[in-house]
């Protein structure tokens, strides 16, 4: 399906863009032009992870009577567990290298603690979360098969409400101590929504989706600034959360727009190949960002308004090339 390939391609580019923009948000002076550039870019790409979860739901929740549970688990393990183990080991070693050679005076890195928290490196949390979504997918298939679409839509809406309230209360209470093996529960509504978006004959006028998307981005950027100036940036980052009251409608509007994008981004063949490299780009790009920041420059060495998209494009292309090299190397193919 062209729209699935298109969605993967734009979502992974948005992930890279977000991580470049986050540097400006965290390091520029609050309220400065560079900070606002980072804030708006960050807010405008917050749909990326929810969209990835929705794509997974659209592809995996379709009932497949011929596919046994053991076959499903074998396929998912080959796709996710091997990359998870490989890159967890890689980034733990990379962190040890950075601490020894780059910042030897820093506090010792809590390797075991971060591993047990499902965050051996900042981006790997997604794989630790998605593993448990996959674990429950065969049972969720039975659920969607037994439910009428309107009942499934009501369940998804209720799950979104609970997840949003949980996220809001965690911000208010300044707590974020949930164990990683329960994270998937918060993303379950996105997973179910992906299936609904694919199956339900729901047509939303494009202008409405665009209006919701634009309003949600503006509210996310302004909400972060308002809370950050009144409290602190950590509190303001609530609006960046993938289950905040602004990111949920942003993500829903974006997936509806992408679903109706039937033309291949480049060509069907090229788009499919780029889509297949998505996981590799996701896993590799933080390492390249580290190298760039250490040995070259950051987004704040230039005007962030143009440096963020320029650096994001460069990191994406470099990650794409390395991921393609991994795919072409028999011993490394399974890692991406």
Image (tube, helix red, strand yellow):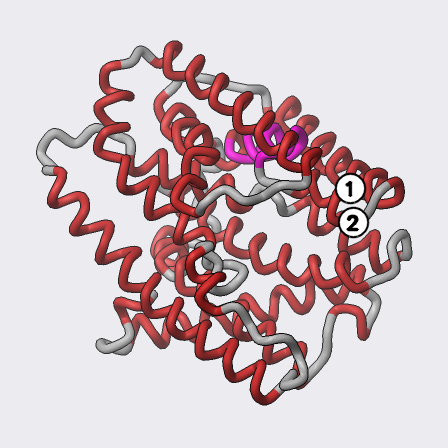
- Frontmost of labels 2 and 1 is 2
Contact, CB < 8 Å: mark 2 with mark 1?
yes
Secondary-structure class at tag 1 = helix
Gap between marks 2 and 1 measured at Cα: 7 Å
Residue found at x 58% / y 41%: 47
Q: Which residues are magenta?
A: 243-255
In this rendered view, identify the residue nearer to me: 153 or 211: 153
Location of residue 15 in the rendering, given as x and y in whole percent from the top left corner: 56, 54
Q: Is residue 226 left or right of residue 142?
A: right
Seen in the picture, residue 114 relative to 218 is either above or below; the reply is below
To which quarter of the image does residue 207 belong? top right
Q: Nearer the viewer, residue 317 or 110?
A: 110
Q: Is residue 227 above or below residue 158?
A: below
Q: Which residue is nearer to you in this view: 61 or 262?
A: 61
Q: Main secondary structure of the magenta part?
A: helix
Place of residue 158 in the rendered image (x, y in percent of width and height, measured from the top left): 49, 17
Going from N to C along the chain, the mark reached first, 2 or 1, is 1
Q: Is residue 76 magenta?
A: no
Q: Does residue 223 appear to the left or right of 213 in the view shown?
A: right
- Quarter of the image for the C terminus: give it: bottom left
Determine which residue is flagged by label 2. Answer: 233
Tell which residue pokes out farthest to the bottom in this image: 101
> Circle 1 sits on which residue?
224
In this rendering, the count of numbered labels is 2
At a point 83% along the width and 67% down the height, the residue shown is 303
Dot 1 crowding, Cα within 10 Å, few <14, some 14–19, many 20+: many
């Amino acid at each position: 399906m062209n729209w699935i390939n298109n969605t993967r391609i734009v979502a992974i580019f948005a992930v890279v863009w977000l991580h470049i923009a986050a540097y400006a948000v965290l390091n520029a002076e609050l309220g400065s032009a560079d900070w606002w550039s980072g804030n708006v870019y960050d807010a405008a790409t917050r749909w990326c992870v929810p969209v990835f979860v929705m794509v997974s739901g659209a592809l995996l929740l379709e009932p497949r009577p011929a596919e046994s549970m053991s076959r499903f688990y074998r396929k998912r393990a080959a796709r996710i567990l091997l990359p998870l183990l490989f890159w967890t080991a890689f980034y733990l070693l990379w962190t040890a290298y950075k601490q020894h050679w780059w910042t030897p005076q820093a506090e010792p890195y809590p390797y075991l603690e971060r591993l047990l928290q499902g965050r051996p490196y900042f981006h790997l949390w997604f794989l630790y979360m998605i593993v448990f979504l996959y674990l429950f997918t065969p049972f969720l298939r039975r659920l969607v098969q037994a439910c009428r679409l309107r009942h499934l839509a009501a369940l998804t809406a209720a799950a979104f409400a609970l997840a949003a309230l949980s996220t809001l209360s965690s911000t208010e209470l300044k707590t974020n101590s949930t164990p990683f093996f329960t994270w998937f529960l918060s993303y379950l509504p996105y997973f179910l929504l992906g299936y609904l978006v694919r199956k339900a004959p729901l047509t939303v006028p494009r202008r409405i989706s665009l209006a919701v998307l634009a309003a949600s981005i503006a509210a996310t950027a302004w909400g972060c600034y308002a809370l950050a100036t009144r409290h602190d940036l950590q509190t303001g980052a609530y609006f960046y959360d993938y289950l905040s009251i602004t990111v949920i409608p942003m993500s829903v509007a974006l997936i509806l727009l992408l679903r109706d994008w039937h033309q291949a981004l480049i060509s069907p063949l090229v788009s499919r190949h780029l889509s297949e490299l998505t996981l590799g780009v996701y896993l590799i790009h933080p390492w390249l960002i580290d190298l760039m920041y250490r040995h070259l420059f950051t987004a704040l060495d230039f005007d962030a308004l143009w440096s963020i998209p320029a650096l994001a494009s460069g990191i994406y292309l470099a990650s794409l090339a390395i991921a393609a090299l991994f795919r072409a190397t028999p011993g490394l193919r399974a890692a991406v």
